[in-house]
Image (tube, rainbow, N blue to C red):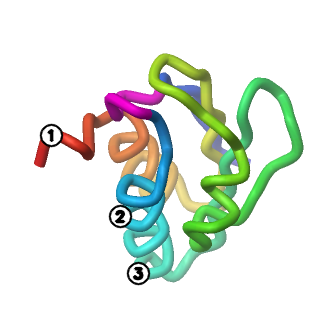
Amino acid sequence: MPSTTVTVGSAVGLHARPATLIAEAAAALGSSVTLAAGGGDPVDAGSALMIMTLGAEKGATITVESDDQAAVDTIAALVAKDLDAE
C-alpha cells in the first residue's frame, strides 16, 4: 500500500482549520486515506475530528497511507503545507 512520511507544516499544527481543509480534500478524492502520527494508530483523513485527535504540532511526523498513490501525494502535500498562511 502506498505511503509516505511528511512533516506538519502548519504553524500551530493540525488544529481545526488545517484538519478541515485536509479532511475536505481527502473526502473529495474518493479513496480511503489514513494519517498516523509517530507510529500511532491511523485515523481517517476524511474526518477533521479524527485528524485533530492526532495532536500533531508543527514539525510532527505524519504517515499518509492509501491504496491510491495520487491520494497519498495530494494529502501529504497538504499536511506539509502551512495551511494557516492562506
Q: Looking at the image, which residue is at 60% across and 22% down?
A: 61
Q: Is residue 64 magenta?
A: no
Task: Compare marks 1 and 2 and give the one earlier in the sequence.
Answer: 2
Q: Which residue is mark 3?
A: 28
Q: Amino acid at mark 1?
A: Ala
Q: Secondary structure at mark 1?
A: loop
Q: Nearer the viewer, residue 10 or 63?
A: 10
Q: Residues within 10 Å of mark 2 (few under 14, many from 20)?
A: some
Real-space Cα separation, disc 1 to disc 3, in angstroms: 22 Å
Task: Compare marks 1 and 3 and give the one earlier in the sequence.
Answer: 3
Q: Is residue 21 above or below residue 39?
A: below
Which stretch is magenta?
8-12
Q: Is residue 8 above or below residue 28?
A: above
Q: Position of residue 55 (x, y in %)?
A: 67, 39
Question: Residue 48 is drawn in which quadrant?
Answer: bottom right
Q: Amino acid at mark 3?
A: Ala
Q: Is residue 68 left or right of residue 17?
A: right
The reply to whether dot 1 and dot 2 touch (C-beta < 8 Å) is: no
Q: Position of residue 12 (x, y in %)?
A: 40, 33
Q: Looking at the image, which residue is at 42% across and 46% down?
A: 73
Real-space Cα separation, disc 1 to disc 2, in angstroms: 13 Å
Q: Secondary structure at mark 3?
A: helix
